[in-house]
Image (cartoon, rainbow, N blue to C red):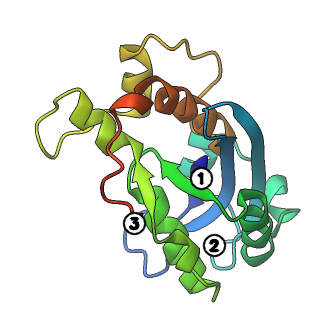
Amino acid sequence: MNYIIFDLELNSKPFKNRHPNEVIEIGAVKLDENLNFAGEFQSFAKPKIYKKIFKVVKNKTHILQQDIDEAEEFKVVIDRFKQWIGTNGLLCSWGHDDIHHLKTNCKFNKVGSRWLKESIDIQKQFSRIYDLPKGQVFSLKNALAMLEIPVEEELHRADIDARYTAEIFKKIFDQLDFGHLKK
Protein backbone atom coordinates (compact mmCIF):
# COMPACT_ATOMS: atom_id res chain seq x y z
CA MET A 1 0.00 0.00 0.00
CA ASN A 2 1.08 3.55 -0.75
CA TYR A 3 0.24 6.47 1.52
CA ILE A 4 -0.93 9.58 -0.30
CA ILE A 5 -0.45 12.59 1.94
CA PHE A 6 -2.33 15.41 0.26
CA ASP A 7 -3.33 19.00 0.86
CA LEU A 8 -5.69 21.39 -0.88
CA GLU A 9 -5.86 25.12 -1.31
CA LEU A 10 -9.34 26.55 -1.79
CA ASN A 11 -10.93 29.65 -3.23
CA SER A 12 -14.15 30.59 -1.53
CA LYS A 13 -16.24 33.61 -0.86
CA PRO A 14 -15.83 34.42 2.81
CA PHE A 15 -19.07 33.84 4.72
CA LYS A 16 -22.50 33.46 3.08
CA ASN A 17 -21.21 30.94 0.57
CA ARG A 18 -23.87 28.83 -1.16
CA HIS A 19 -21.30 27.12 -3.36
CA PRO A 20 -18.55 24.71 -2.28
CA ASN A 21 -15.12 26.02 -1.50
CA GLU A 22 -13.48 25.37 -4.85
CA VAL A 23 -10.19 23.49 -5.05
CA ILE A 24 -7.59 25.65 -6.76
CA GLU A 25 -4.51 23.59 -5.88
CA ILE A 26 -3.79 19.97 -5.04
CA GLY A 27 -0.44 18.93 -3.63
CA ALA A 28 0.52 15.43 -2.57
CA VAL A 29 3.40 13.20 -1.55
CA LYS A 30 3.37 9.46 -2.14
CA LEU A 31 5.12 7.23 0.39
CA ASP A 32 5.54 3.51 -0.23
CA GLU A 33 4.77 0.80 2.34
CA ASN A 34 8.21 1.40 3.91
CA LEU A 35 7.53 5.15 4.12
CA ASN A 36 10.06 5.93 1.40
CA PHE A 37 9.38 8.86 -0.89
CA ALA A 38 7.75 7.52 -4.08
CA GLY A 39 6.64 10.68 -5.85
CA GLU A 40 5.04 14.08 -5.69
CA PHE A 41 2.00 15.67 -7.33
CA GLN A 42 1.10 19.34 -7.69
CA SER A 43 -1.48 21.00 -9.88
CA PHE A 44 -3.60 24.12 -9.93
CA ALA A 45 -7.28 23.79 -10.86
CA LYS A 46 -9.40 26.39 -12.59
CA PRO A 47 -12.46 27.30 -10.49
CA LYS A 48 -15.94 27.38 -12.07
CA ILE A 49 -17.82 29.79 -9.82
CA TYR A 50 -15.38 32.26 -8.32
CA LYS A 51 -12.89 32.73 -11.14
CA LYS A 52 -10.91 35.44 -9.35
CA ILE A 53 -8.81 34.57 -6.34
CA PHE A 54 -10.18 36.27 -3.28
CA LYS A 55 -7.76 38.65 -1.59
CA VAL A 56 -7.65 36.67 1.67
CA VAL A 57 -6.76 33.51 -0.30
CA LYS A 58 -4.14 35.31 -2.38
CA ASN A 59 -2.53 36.81 0.74
CA LYS A 60 -2.47 33.46 2.55
CA THR A 61 -1.30 31.22 -0.31
CA HIS A 62 0.51 33.58 -2.67
CA ILE A 63 -1.15 31.76 -5.56
CA LEU A 64 -1.29 34.08 -8.54
CA GLN A 65 -4.37 34.76 -10.63
CA GLN A 66 -2.37 33.64 -13.66
CA ASP A 67 -1.78 30.24 -12.00
CA ILE A 68 -5.47 29.42 -11.93
CA ASP A 69 -6.31 31.20 -15.20
CA GLU A 70 -3.90 28.87 -17.00
CA ALA A 71 -4.90 25.76 -15.02
CA GLU A 72 -6.95 22.83 -16.25
CA GLU A 73 -10.49 22.27 -15.02
CA PHE A 74 -11.02 20.29 -11.81
CA LYS A 75 -12.24 17.19 -13.70
CA VAL A 76 -9.01 16.97 -15.70
CA VAL A 77 -6.82 17.62 -12.65
CA ILE A 78 -8.63 15.06 -10.52
CA ASP A 79 -8.35 12.42 -13.26
CA ARG A 80 -4.58 12.99 -13.37
CA PHE A 81 -4.44 12.89 -9.56
CA LYS A 82 -6.35 9.60 -9.42
CA GLN A 83 -4.07 8.11 -12.08
CA TRP A 84 -1.01 9.27 -10.14
CA ILE A 85 -2.37 7.72 -6.92
CA GLY A 86 -2.89 4.33 -8.57
CA THR A 87 -5.00 1.49 -7.25
CA ASN A 88 -3.34 0.97 -3.88
CA GLY A 89 -3.15 4.43 -2.35
CA LEU A 90 -4.59 5.42 1.03
CA LEU A 91 -5.42 9.13 1.25
CA CYS A 92 -4.08 10.93 4.30
CA SER A 93 -4.54 14.60 5.18
CA TRP A 94 -3.98 17.07 7.97
CA GLY A 95 -7.53 17.37 9.26
CA HIS A 96 -10.89 16.20 7.97
CA ASP A 97 -11.56 19.36 5.92
CA ASP A 98 -9.47 18.38 2.90
CA ILE A 99 -11.21 15.04 2.36
CA HIS A 100 -14.57 16.79 2.85
CA HIS A 101 -13.72 19.49 0.29
CA LEU A 102 -12.39 16.91 -2.15
CA LYS A 103 -15.67 14.96 -1.93
CA THR A 104 -17.73 18.16 -2.24
CA ASN A 105 -15.77 19.29 -5.29
CA CYS A 106 -16.11 15.87 -6.90
CA LYS A 107 -19.87 15.99 -6.41
CA PHE A 108 -20.10 19.58 -7.66
CA ASN A 109 -18.07 18.71 -10.76
CA LYS A 110 -19.95 15.42 -11.33
CA VAL A 111 -16.89 13.28 -10.72
CA GLY A 112 -17.28 9.92 -8.96
CA SER A 113 -16.06 9.86 -5.39
CA ARG A 114 -16.02 6.15 -4.48
CA TRP A 115 -12.24 6.31 -4.41
CA LEU A 116 -12.54 8.68 -1.41
CA LYS A 117 -14.20 6.21 0.96
CA GLU A 118 -11.25 5.56 3.24
CA SER A 119 -8.76 8.06 4.56
CA ILE A 120 -6.60 8.91 7.53
CA ASP A 121 -6.97 12.19 9.43
CA ILE A 122 -3.39 12.72 10.57
CA GLN A 123 -4.28 15.79 12.64
CA LYS A 124 -6.88 13.86 14.65
CA GLN A 125 -4.49 10.96 15.18
CA PHE A 126 -1.67 13.32 16.17
CA SER A 127 -3.95 14.99 18.72
CA ARG A 128 -4.91 11.55 20.12
CA ILE A 129 -1.29 10.42 20.31
CA TYR A 130 -0.30 13.58 22.19
CA ASP A 131 -3.37 13.38 24.44
CA LEU A 132 -5.10 16.61 23.60
CA PRO A 133 -8.60 16.98 25.09
CA LYS A 134 -11.38 15.83 22.74
CA GLY A 135 -12.29 18.52 20.24
CA GLN A 136 -8.89 20.22 20.39
CA VAL A 137 -6.34 19.75 17.63
CA PHE A 138 -2.84 20.89 16.77
CA SER A 139 -2.25 23.19 13.82
CA LEU A 140 0.25 21.93 11.27
CA LYS A 141 2.67 24.66 12.33
CA ASN A 142 2.41 23.72 16.03
CA ALA A 143 2.77 19.99 15.31
CA LEU A 144 5.93 20.66 13.28
CA ALA A 145 7.34 22.73 16.14
CA MET A 146 6.45 20.06 18.70
CA LEU A 147 8.26 17.40 16.66
CA GLU A 148 11.17 19.78 16.05
CA ILE A 149 10.80 19.55 12.27
CA PRO A 150 12.41 22.70 10.87
CA VAL A 151 10.13 24.74 8.62
CA GLU A 152 12.17 26.21 5.81
CA GLU A 153 9.34 27.13 3.44
CA GLU A 154 6.23 29.22 3.96
CA LEU A 155 3.18 27.09 4.74
CA HIS A 156 -0.23 27.36 3.03
CA ARG A 157 0.70 25.98 -0.35
CA ALA A 158 -0.65 22.52 -1.10
CA ASP A 159 2.61 20.88 -2.16
CA ILE A 160 4.60 22.38 0.71
CA ASP A 161 2.00 21.50 3.35
CA ALA A 162 1.79 17.95 1.95
CA ARG A 163 5.58 17.55 2.28
CA TYR A 164 5.58 18.72 5.89
CA THR A 165 2.53 16.59 6.73
CA ALA A 166 4.36 13.58 5.27
CA GLU A 167 7.25 14.26 7.65
CA ILE A 168 4.85 14.22 10.61
CA PHE A 169 3.17 11.06 9.25
CA LYS A 170 6.51 9.25 9.12
CA LYS A 171 7.42 10.32 12.67
CA ILE A 172 4.14 9.09 14.20
CA PHE A 173 3.45 6.16 11.86
CA ASP A 174 4.06 3.45 14.49
CA GLN A 175 1.43 5.04 16.74
CA LEU A 176 -1.30 5.50 14.11
CA ASP A 177 -4.59 3.67 14.47
CA PHE A 178 -5.69 2.05 11.21
CA GLY A 179 -8.55 0.16 12.90
CA HIS A 180 -11.31 2.08 11.13
CA LEU A 181 -10.16 0.95 7.69
CA LYS A 182 -11.72 -2.01 5.91
CA LYS A 183 -9.44 -5.00 5.63
- Quarter in which the C terminus is drawn: bottom left
Question: Residue 5: where, in percent of width, then height?
Answer: 58, 45
Q: Image quadrant of residue 29?
A: top right
Question: Residue 9, labelled with which disc?
Answer: 1
Q: Which residue is mark 2?
A: 50
Give the mark nearest the N terminus, 1 or 3: 1
Instruction: Name the residue at the left extreme.
Output: 133
Contact, mark 1 vs mark 3 (Cβ under 8 Å)? no
Crowdedness near tag 1: few (<14), some (14–19) or many (≥20) residues, C-alpha within 10 Å: many
Give the mark nearest the N terminus, 3 or 2: 2
Q: Residue at x 63, y 47 (%)?
A: 58
SS label for mark 1: strand
What whole-number distance in Å separates the C-alpha atoms at marks 2 and 1?
14 Å
Choose between 69 and 39: the one closer to the eye. Answer: 39
In the image, taking residue 89 as reference, residue 121 lies left or right, namely left
What whole-number distance in Å separates the C-alpha atoms at marks 1 and 3?
29 Å
Question: Residue 79: where, in percent of width, then height?
Answer: 77, 72
Tell me if residue 147 comes above or below residue 26 in the rendering: above
Q: Residue at x 59, y 53 (%)?
A: 9
Q: Is residue 56 visible?
A: yes
Question: Residue 182, labelled with which disc?
Answer: 3
SS label for mark 3: loop
Question: Of the residues tagged 1 and 3, which is closer to the observer?
Answer: 3
Q: Amino acid at mark 1?
A: Glu
Question: Residue 128: where, in percent of width, then height?
Answer: 22, 37
